[in-house]
Image (cartoon, rainbow, N blue to C red):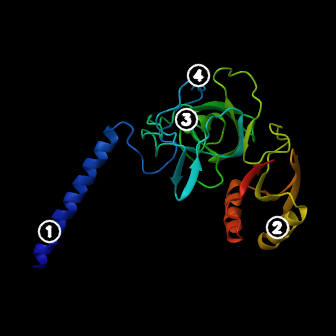
Amino acid sequence: MRFANARNLVVLLTSVALLAIALNGCGKKTRGYPHPVDGPGEHRDVSRVPDATPKIEPRSRGGNPSTYVVLGKRYYTLPDGKGFVERGIASWYGRKFHGRKTSNGEVYDMYTMTAAHKRLPIPTYLKVTNLENGRSVVVRVNDRGPFHENRVVDLSYAAASRIGMLGKGTALVEIRSIDPAAPRRPQTTQVVYSPLPTKPGKPVSGQPQIFLQAGAFTSSENAERLRKRLQRGLSLNVRITPVHTASGAVHRVQVGPLASVAVADNVSTQMHELGIQKPLVVID
């Protein structure tokens, strides 16, 4: 009986090994077969890959629901991207999704200039500027994401390479929508997400710094109470920055500056424990 069991086990293990080899062979032969681990994939020179060329396109039939839920969080798609400006942390995605369908049904090609965004309509053309080195690229949004906290845009491998963020994996960026009807004409900033400096569009002087905004109050007393609570709970510097709006002064409570994206992610988790569920990244 022992011998029979052992022989059956050998047969079973041999069958599993042969099946694994067969599946592996199929994976290599199938174009766009998703890789289980994300990363750059095969080395390819993308320095001459052109920017996306803005052109007038209808909204995609796929990928543009008015609202959708991912990982228990609800998102709302904007009616248009005119005047959209956002500063925050960019990430990139590569071989794990290469060859898979994007949210609008296109096939993701990591070697072209594309991007994913949670709220902008698909397609939208964006100018993405790395605030750490001044390099920029024009991309076409054809996917949804990133759904990692504290990230504003997910760039293709080619776009990430162009602005010099492959090594770090993230970068502090500014993204601006481009009007395909007048791609070279500066747009009036009408829509702003992720708190910007007092004057939207104002360039970052020196090296950009990361802050996490915990709240904004018309009452300076309420802002000060939150500042003290966070400073006690986090043992980090917490500042109050007033912003003058049409309806009066708003006092923004911000933690930082923070040394890196990794530190910001860790502090976000600590802020959740203190009751701040949605800290906002501020690049200043």
Q: CA distance from mark 3 to mark 2?
A: 38 Å
In percent of width and height, residue 32 lies at 39, 38
Question: Which label sits on residue 55?
Answer: 4
Looking at the image, is mark 1 or mark 4 nearer the viewer? 4
Three-letter residue code for mark 4: Lys
Q: Is residue 262 left or right of residue 45?
A: right
Q: CA distance from mark 1 to mark 2?
A: 67 Å
Three-letter residue code for mark 3: Ile
**Circle 3/circle 1 CB separation < 8 Å:** no
In percent of width and height, residue 250 lies at 86, 53
Q: Secondary structure at mark 3?
A: loop
Q: Which residue is mark 1?
A: 8
Q: Earlier in the sequence, mark 3 or mark 2?
A: 3
Residue 260 visible, this orientation: yes
Q: Earlier in the sequence, mark 1 or mark 4?
A: 1
Q: Is residue 82 left or right of residue 4?
A: right
Residue 147 visible, this orientation: no
Q: CA distance from mark 1 to mark 4?
A: 63 Å
Q: Quadrant of the N terminus?
A: bottom left
> Which is nearer the eye, 261 or 223?
223
Looking at the image, is mark 1 or mark 2 nearer the viewer? 2
Q: Does 30 sit above or below residue 70?
A: above
Q: Residue at x 70, y 69 (%)?
A: 275
Q: Is residue 203 left or right of residue 74?
A: right
Q: Secondary structure at mark 2?
A: helix
Question: Which label sits on residue 122?
Answer: 3
